[in-house]
Image (cartoon, helix red, strand yellow):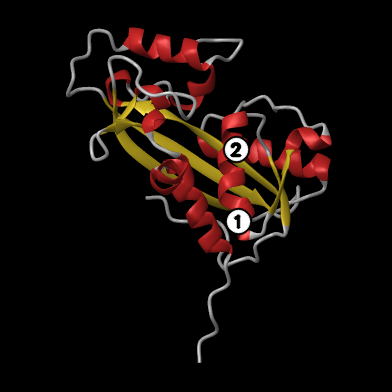
Amino acid sequence: MGAPCCHGESIMSPAQLVLASGNAGKLREFHQLLVPLGIEVHAQADYGVADVEETGLTFVENALLKAREASRLSGLPALADDSGLEVDALAGAPGIYSARYAGEPKSDARNNARLLEALAEVPEGRRRARYWCVLVLLRHAEDPVPLIVQRSWEGEILQAPRGEGGFGYDPLFWLPDQQASAAELDAEQKNRLSHRGRALQALVAAMTPEPARS
């Protein structure tokens, strides 16, 4: 699972694009990953684009909604991310509702507190979880064949937060192989290991033309 889909051939990397997100943490991570590749990155707020209502039932649907609106209003190619946390013991919740798990207004601290409350009776060893990231790139607002990639990141949910970095559920997302929470990783480590970092690597690979065969 997780292979790029929807474009049958590689497409050229855009010289600039608009990020269809108002999430400061996501914007920071995308800047770190895209700017070194020579891609000029614009925030959707630069074009007066507000967050769209996420009415989709899947990460893919919501990412498409966001990318289409940002491209329509900016006139640029648009990259949208829809991501979330899936906890096995909660039948996949919070899932597509991860950012608003504790209701409005959105708050990482309240979302984390609600997750800990929901898992209060779940013992260590049964707290398996994964982050999902779906990326959608639209060349223009009416693009009929969006480039879509998805990646996951496996971990476990801690019983108390650890670390000061990251955002979202990172302080509760334990990585056994690193013996650290996602919030304890530095930017280079997180971009290399995370669902979002690896999804973006796959997206860039899908945008890179294959060498001509002799």
Can residue 61 be seen here? The reply is no
Q: 174 above or below 119?
A: below
Which of marks 1 and 2 precedes in the sequence? 2
Q: Is residue 109 left or right of residue 68?
A: left
Q: CA distance from mark 2 to mark 1?
A: 13 Å
What amino acid is at disc 1?
Pro
Q: Secondary structure at mark 1?
A: helix
Q: Residue at x 17, y 24 (%)?
A: 125
**Callout 1 environment at 10 Å: few (<14), some (14 to 19), or many (20+)?**
few
Q: Residue at x 48, y 40 (%)?
A: 133
Residue annotated with mark 1: 36
Residue annotated with mark 2: 28
Total numbered circles? 2
**Callout 2 environment at 10 Å: few (<14), some (14 to 19), or many (20+)?**
few
Q: Is residue 34 left or right of residue 173?
A: right
Q: Position of residue 141 (x, y in %)?
A: 76, 47
Can residue 67 be seen here? The reply is yes
Q: Position of residue 177 (x, y in %)?
A: 23, 40
Q: Is residue 194 left or right of residue 205?
A: left
| Observer-nearest of 192 and 111 | 192
Q: Is residue 136 left or right of residue 173?
A: right
Q: Position of residue 181 (x, y in %)?
A: 33, 29
What amino acid is at disc 2?
Arg
Q: Residue at x 25, y 23 (%)?
A: 127
